[in-house]
Image (cartoon, rainbow, N blue to C red):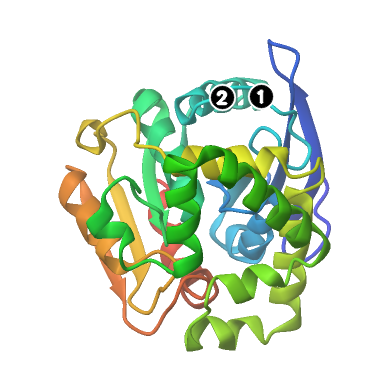
Amino acid sequence: MEMVDRAGMEQLEEAITLPDGRRLGYALLGDPSGFPVVYCHGFPSSRFEARRLGVVASELGALVIAPDRPGIGLSDFQPQRRILDWPDDLDHLAAALGIERFSLLGCSGGLPYAAAAAYRLADRVFRLSSLSGLGPTDDAALTRSMGAAARFGFHLARHRPRLFAFTYGTLGRLVARFPGLVFLLNEATPPDQRVLQRPEVRDNLRRAILEAFRQGHRGPLHELRLLAQPWAFDPQDIATPVDIWHGCQDHVVPLAMAEVLAQRLPEATLTRLEDDGHISPIYQHGHRILRPLLPGR
């Protein structure tokens, strides 16, 4: 594998064919010979989101593998899929890449998928990290402090499915044309606003969001439906060591959600980032977040 720049390897258009014939797209970043870290992107987003870890991964000796979930980017839509179907896709991807053991990094809406993989593939997972991670949204006490747009979306998905499909289908088409809307809907706090002033940050986030809607809004719409449902497993059954990194000024996913997850996960360590929001932690603490996911670090 060729080293292309100071960020190390950056292969963004990779794909495999799964046993059921679906295509699964992914990106590879960092050190080609490094320990594998599977990056589960947020919502609405795609494999391009992981580019923010490229330099850090190369410096620490990590190989970041960032797959698109079904219906996102390069990955074919999977009708009636569940979050617990995701570990099977990761299992096939790891086999195709010749990987026996790996860590997981679940960012925002990617945490339920990373947690499901830690639950189902426990013997292959070294460590799990939650970064601004979204916990179970069926707990009204936890979602009450979320932003208005998120609360409204989860409410419609659970109780008014037809209105949800119409409203968020329309919103999805708008976001696909104007990805900057996501920044407005997420009510970015000052730490995030400072990070978003950097052109390279805004450009990569826009690209990640646009790629999420590459196939239209069907995939992201199904993603939001799944995120509105209870987890189909108990976090207490995840035996993998877990690091939870969460900004105290996160208005997208409230700190209370991270605190409850830390209580439910038997091997969890919560780090509260006092001066961070939802987006900023990876840019401010990238080495600190990635290092525990690598054996011997």
Label 1 CA crowd tier, 10 Å (few <14, some 14–19, many 20+): some
Residue at 21% in and 44% down: 265
Left or right: 111 as drawn, with respect to 193 = left
Mark 1 — residue?
Answer: 78
Residue at x 30% of width, y 29% of height: 233
Residue 81 is labelled as: 2
* Dot 2 and dot 1 residues touching (CB under 8 Å): yes
Where the N terminus falls, by quadrant?
top right
Instruction: Answer whether residue 149 is visible to the viewer in this image.
Output: yes
Residue 19 occupies quadrant: top right
Q: Is 63 situated left or right of 111 in this image?
A: right
Label 2, label 1: how far apart the Cα atoms are:
6 Å
Q: Secondary structure at mark 2?
A: loop
Q: Is residue 297 visible?
A: no
Foreground pick, 186 / 123: 186
Q: Tell me residue 20's x, y (percent).
A: 69, 11
